[in-house]
Image (cartoon, rainbow, N blue to C red):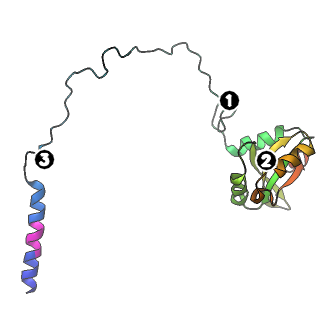
């Protein structure tokens, strides 16, 4: 009985595999490879002029991931540079601070995208921490107004800081 089952299984496998090798006109095995026939690719009247950029001046826009020299740079470096360039007498909103960069990044992700944000690293008592900063404001009143407009889950641990206090802690 076991031998008959093996033979039947073998016959089924062989017959199903042989079906793949049949040569029918519509089957895949009769596929003809593509050959170029020389027909025009574009409709009549379509402009196919080749343009030359020789001597043209190309302006590369400032990008979030490109330094002033237009070489790739880390977003961490760009954020730190932005923080250090702010007026020390101005204000910012510190949305989050903690020892986990992912926690700070998650809070920044929830914030509205209408102000510049940055995540910077600093050291305190030999331990690494991160700050999530939101916007730059000339006065404390402007910062308070922006803070009050933030969604409740974003502003629950937020506070207003002077740029000088933030800049003094940022790692170089």
Q: Residue 163 vs residue 12: left or right?
A: right
On residue 69, the disc is 1
Disc 3 and disc 1 in contact, CB within 8 angstroms: no
Q: Is residue 84 above or below residue 160?
A: above
Front-most of 25 and 17?
25
- Quarter of the rendering containing residue 20: bottom left
Which residue is painted at 77% across and 44% down in the image? 80
| Tag 3 secondary structure | helix
Q: Name the residue under label 2.
A: 134
Q: Is residue 76 visible?
A: yes
**Disc on the earlier residue, 1 or 2:** 1
Q: Position of residue 57 (x, y in %)?
A: 59, 16
Asked whether 12 falls inside the magenta stretch, the response is yes
Front-most of 111 and 14?
111
Q: Residue 105 vs residue 165: left or right?
A: left
- Quarter of the rendering containing residue 155: bottom right
The magenta-colored residue range is 9-14
Asked whether 10 falls inside the magenta stretch, the response is yes
Q: Name the residue under label 3.
A: 29
């Amino acid at each position: 009985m076991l031998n008959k089952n093996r033979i039947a299984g073998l016959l089924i496998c062989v017959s199903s595999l042989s079906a793949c090798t049949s040569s029918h006109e519509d089957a895949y095995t009769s596929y003809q490879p593509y050959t170029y026939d020389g027909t025009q690719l574009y409709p009549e009247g379509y402009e196919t002029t080749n343009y030359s950029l020789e001597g043209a001046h190309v302006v590369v826009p400032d990008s979030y991931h490109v330094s002033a020299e237009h070489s790739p740079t880390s977003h961490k470096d760009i954020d730190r540079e932005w923080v250090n360039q702010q007026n020390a007498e101005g204000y910012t909103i510190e949305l989050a601070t903690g020892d986990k960069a992912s926690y700070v990044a998650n809070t920044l992700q929830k914030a509205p995208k209408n102000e510049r944000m940055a995540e910077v690293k600093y050291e305190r008592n030999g331990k690494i921490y991160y700050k999530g900063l939101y916007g730059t404001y000339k006065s404390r009143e402007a910062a308070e107004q922006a803070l009050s407009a933030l969604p409740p889950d974003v502003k629950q641990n937020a506070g207003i800081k002077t740029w000088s206090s933030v800049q003094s802690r940022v790692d170089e």
